[in-house]
Amino acid sequence: MRLEKCWFCSSTIYPGHGITFVRNDATTFKFCRSKCHKNFKMKRNPRKVRWTKAYRKLAGKELAEDATFEMERRRNRPEKYDRDLVKKTVKAIERISEIRVRRQERFYEKRMAKVKGQQVARDKQQLEQEIHLVKAPASLVSDKAQQKSKEKLKVAVEAKQQKQKQQAQGADAMQERAAVQLG
């Protein structure tokens, strides 16, 4: 069973499905559905249409280069029938498809990790801007009063520490003078 690829969106076309378009110069184009055929007739570029595989690969949204894709290209060549070879091939195809799925999932996770960090930052910023929607206005007033009292306390503590430092420096200076006078 030969599985063809859609010329426009690169999805698989199973036997008995799709549309084959033959141009005057005898080039054939296979399409999976009328949507792809109509877009082709409208002369749209598949790399610019967002739902196609070509766009997704070009934009970095999908895994573009991988060794598992090479196996799929080799699979379409007709070979002489050999039972053992078919058995090995079927096992290899299953294993390769598992590997491809895992790699695609890993690629997706890496891509989404960046987006998740950006989303968290946006959410924090939005929460800071719209905090009045989350907290009641009375609690905001009390929060502001608490912040002011904390700031006052902080300033008072810093002033006290500075005063203690000055006193300690003054005491050190007096001891030095006394040592100089005695010595």
Image: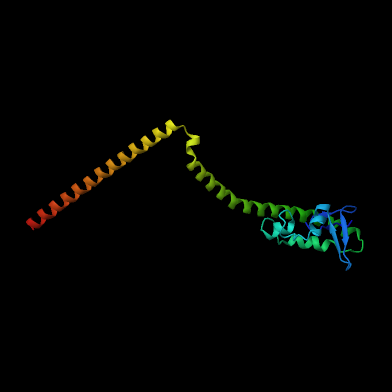
128 relative to 156 in the view: left or right: right
Q: Is residue 33 visible?
A: no
Q: Residue at x 62, y 51 (%)?
A: 112
Residue sitting at the far bottom: 25
Q: How is the image coloured?
A: rainbow
Q: Quadrant of the N terminus?
A: bottom right
**Can you give x and y, in whole percent of width and height, for residue 115 in the image?**
59, 51
Q: Quadrant of the C terminus?
A: bottom left
Q: Residue at x 53, y 47 (%)?
A: 122
153 relative to 136 in the view: left or right: left
Of 45 and 158, the residue lying toward us: 45
**Can you give x and y, in whole percent of width and height, for residue 132 in the image?**
47, 36
15 relative to 65 in the view: left or right: right
The image shows residue 33, relative to residue 151, as above or below, that is below
58 relative to 141 in the view: left or right: right
Of 126 and 37, the residue lying toward us: 37
| Picture quadrant of residue 63 | bottom right
Q: Residue at x 11, y 55 (%)?
A: 177
Residue sitting at the far left: 182
**Can you give x and y, in whole percent of width and height, for residue 110 in the image?**
62, 53
The image shows residue 20, relative to residue 166, as above or below, that is below
Q: Is residue 139 visible?
A: yes
| Picture quadrant of residue 31 | bottom right
Q: Residue at x 52, y 48 (%)?
A: 121
The image shows residue 26, relative to residue 16, as above or below, that is below
**Can you give x and y, in whole percent of width and height, for residue 120 in the image?**
54, 46
Residue sitting at the far front: 42
Of 168 and 179, the residue lying toward us: 168
The image shows residue 71, relative to residue 154, as above or below, that is below
| Picture quadrant of residue 64 | bottom right
Image mark count: 0
